[in-house]
Image (spheres, rainbow, N blue to C red):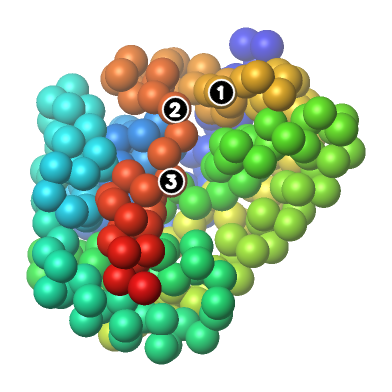
Amino acid sequence: MEKMIQDLIDKLEKTIIDSKLPKKIGVAFSGGVDSSLLAKMCTDQGYQVTLLTIGFESSHDIMFSKKVNEFLKLPHHIFEINKQSFDTVSSKIINNIKNDNLSWNENGIAFYYVANLAKDLKIDTVVTANGIDELFCGYNAYREAIKEGEKKVMELMESKLENEIKMMEAINEICSEFNVKIVQPFLNDDFIQFAKKIPVQYKIQNEDDLLRKHIIRDVAKVKGVPEISVIQRKKALQYGSLIHKALIKSK
């Protein structure tokens, strides 16, 4: 197990290096284990990291990201969404993204705000941890899949990955308005193939597994990610920022 954890650390670090990031980067940051691990690894590699958090006032992501950064102590900028700007931005994104998938629209809105915040800070590259939830069974749907066995888990993983890659391509087009590039190191082909070979038992244990992503949490502990982040359960960006709630209300 220790070797597997170290191999994963090595691969994560190499994947970030292979992304050929500029020295100054933003990290889309919720305080969860994935974005915290990404921020810590990028910092350890010498990048000038600025944490970027968006959400409505008193949303989970704003409050929790502040708590986690009390330990990380990195430059941290927060954009609080208000209803007036949300109505304008959400209409624009829904018209531009041309996809009825609610998650695509919600993530498009979220990253539009992240990219706008980055532009204001003169940051032209934002790095995200997209891919970890797909590859390491972060979503609740994996609890249903594991009931039917590992084959079903892998089928769901393929579907989730295909959707995520397409969604992030669409989101990059939206964010190009600000001349900001959204980079997802953990969605590159080499890392995907590596991560798929890690046994499912190190990702999800059974249908009652509420935590999941166990080997990623083990990596985070080794890399010095704050404990409150390591043990935090998954909360998707659109929920943690309250964008989902606002979008449903606006319909």
Residue 250: image x %, image y %?
A: 30, 71
Q: Is residue 248 above or below residue 178?
A: above
Residue that appears at 26% across and 42% down = 61
Relative to the observer, which residue lies in front, 4 or 63?
63
Q: CA distance from mark 2 to mark 3?
A: 10 Å
Tag 2 and tag 1, C-beta contact below 8 Å = yes
Extreme-top residue of the structure: 2
At mark 3, the secondary structure is loop
> Which amino acid does the dot numbered 3 rest on?
Ala
* Residue receiving disc 3: 236
Relative to the observer, which residue lies in front, 143 or 170?
143
* Residue receiving disc 2: 233
Residue that appears at 17% across and 27% down = 67
Residue that appears at 68% across and 11% down = 1
Q: Quadrant of the C terminus?
A: bottom left
Q: CA distance from mark 2 to mark 1?
A: 7 Å
> Which amino acid does the dot numbered 2 rest on?
Arg
Residue 111 in view here: no
Relative to the observer, which residue lies in front, 130 or 194?
130
Tag 2 and tag 3, C-beta contact below 8 Å = no
Residue that appears at 64% across and 64% down = 163
Residue 22: image x %, image y %?
A: 31, 61
* Number of the label disc, if any, that sits on residue 89: none
* Residue receiving disc 1: 210
